[in-house]
Amino acid sequence: LALVCVSEKKVESIARIHHHHKVIVTRVPFKMKVILLLLLLTTIILQTSASSSPYHYIPPTTSTTPSFYSTSLASTLSQKWSHAHSLALLEQTVEDYNAEIVATAPDAISSISKRRLIVLPLDDKFDPPMGMFSHGHVQTGDKMSLPKLFWQAIVKSGAEVPWLFEVTRVEGITSPRVPNTHTSTTHTKKNHPPPSLINKVVGGAIDFRSPSNYIFLPHWMITSLSLRPFDVVDVSLKTNTPPGSAVKLRPHSSQFTKIQNHRAVLETELRHYSALVKGSTIPFDYLGKRYYFDVVELRSAPRGEKVDMAKVQDCDIAAEFVKAKDLLGKKKKKSDDDDDESTTSGALSGAVSKWPRYEEGVWWIQDAAAALPALALRNAFDIIGSNENGNKDLSSLYVVDMCAAPGGKTSQLLSMGFGHVTAVESNARRSRRLIENLNRLGFYTSSSSEEEEDGGEEALLSQEEGERKPLCDVVISDGRSWLPSSSKEEEDTGNSSEGVAAEASVVNGILLDVPCSATGTGAHNPDVLRKDPDLGNLLQIQEELVNHCVDDILPIGGVLVYATCSLLKVEGEGQVDKLLARGGLEEEDTRVAAVMKTIPFEKEEIAGFDDAIDSNGWLRVLPGMLEGELGNCDGFFVARLVKVA
């Protein structure tokens, strides 16, 4: 707003924009004085006819360049003045509301953790420099540009990564929903999704350099909330979003699922989202084409409850596709082109669960190198048996698969004929997948967890199989503290427990595939090579698992197979060297540590892997080192040891 004072010698204009005041003193001819008075009169008229709601600002829809052929100078100035007045009124109203937040906040952190802001679309000007994580993903991620005030809120509150912010429509203030909100001329992608009916989204920050009353959102967020530019939303720092464990996505186009490595593409692109909200529509780009996905269902960790929003960043989340949007309501037409690819080209593509006989449990997928640990354990008993009284009967042996999910090695052990198998997994969501895989393959399981023993959640597996005897126990427990159930209960109460493990309190063998940096899987999962793993923490977990297995679980004569899909020697050979070196040493609790001895791998023991046997008798498989198709297998390390004292 401007106050114009006319005198014989000068005109003083006092304009208030935010909190800055500027006074201009100049000599003005009489004609200019008349024009200024007319502008003042126009201002009064505009104030009188202004919208009843100061929150509703309508931006100009036509060119703001004056055209002296189509309109008068006064009309152009009047139009510009009208827009400037409306925008100033909107900004002042938002600022007044935020001042009220500060005045009524119960503490300092609350006063800076929430704001009412004006929405503008994020464009490529916000793209971070090349080399930064979000570069090239301004529109295919959930990052927004926020005022620096929110950075102060993060610092003062000590919020943990990922920093999440909730953007919410304001009932009665945000303008009515619109059919399409993609207004940026720089956004050239076609086939925009229709707006959803959600009222809030959650995302991260691309930077904190937005003006104090503004927020810049990616186009998909504007669409999901059905917003217009200059709409008003409430924004707050979100610190209680649960971690996600699973998500169901509905592709808008069935063409996405025809991409041969579409699941790998999904996992890669999903990294650019800090969180997901049920009902929103998110975009991914692949090979120059944009694909849209509806978030159909979200589940939290560790119990798997359905939630409306969940964190994705730094979470082990399983993604599942439901029927594509363009196929809903369509009947599949049978043609010669629809025949199973396995009968036409000998190749399989698409979702693994749709491959022939998957649901029948006839087969499972496992990398050739990942199959080595179970083979090593089985062969160990042949070697030990031949040194004593002939081969041991596997059906009389009790073995444990530590860190068992998703179940490939457990399935191997069961199919080899081991009489008693326990699969131990610390992650509840991965345990659920483990149980599903074992039941699909016909290995009926029973499940338990430390939480169930304490009165927590019910068993993950419903007893659909009647009274059929379980072939495998799945235990949700930290492998660094787990003990066979019979040994544990006898120690606590003097009684044995029911179930598979209880029938064999003596563990004859342990397959320990430790958590690791997974650098050996880089050929088909290159993302692991870009990550910076917390190697110190991983090494500590590995050592604690090994020590617990050999000291607290294995009896003398028991076999340990140590395995890792890491290429780093410190996670493979280094851990086994430490295990062999510690044997017989006195520890702080005066207990003598177990003494282990290597059972070396023998030539021709495992076909095709002779070249992977090192001088210690361990297996070190490197990608590309073997001939033929085995050259494509993952990097792996396997050592086999027996407890001798």
Image (cartoon, rainbow, N blue to C red):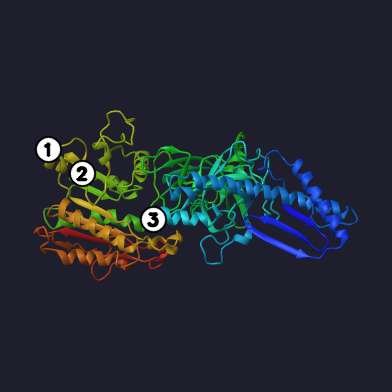
Distance from disc 3 to disc 2, alpha carbons, whole Å, reads 26 Å
Amino acid found under the numbered disc labelled 2 = Ser
| Dot 3 or dot 2, earlier in sequence | 3
**Residue 1 against residue 132 in the figure, above or below:** above
How many numbered marks are there? 3
Callout 3 crowding tier (Cα within 10 Å): few <14, some 14–19, many ≥20: few
Quarter of the rendering containing residue 173: top right
Q: Which residue is mark 1?
A: 493
Front: mark 3 or 1 = 1
* Residue 532 screen position, x and y as percent: 40, 63
Q: Which residue is mark 3?
A: 367
Amino acid found under the numbered disc labelled 1 = Thr
Q: Nearer the viewer, residue 465 or 378?
A: 465
Q: Is residue 607 left or right of residue 204?
A: left
Q: Secondary structure at mark 3?
A: loop
Q: Secondary structure at mark 1?
A: loop
Amino acid found under the numbered disc labelled 3 = Asp
Callout 1 crowding tier (Cα within 10 Å): few <14, some 14–19, many ≥20: few
Seen from this angle, which residue lies furthest front?
8
* Residue 131 screen position, x and y as percent: 52, 67
- Tell whether label 1 touches label 3 (CB within 8 Å): no
Quarter of the rendering containing residue 624: bottom left
Seen from this angle, which residue lies furthest right?
69
| Dot 2 or dot 1, earlier in sequence | 2
Front: mark 3 or 2 = 3
* Residue 98 screen position, x and y as percent: 55, 47
Distance from disc 2 to disc 1, alpha carbons, whole Å, reads 29 Å
Callout 2 crowding tier (Cα within 10 Å): few <14, some 14–19, many ≥20: few
Q: Residue 395 shows which numbered tag?
A: 2
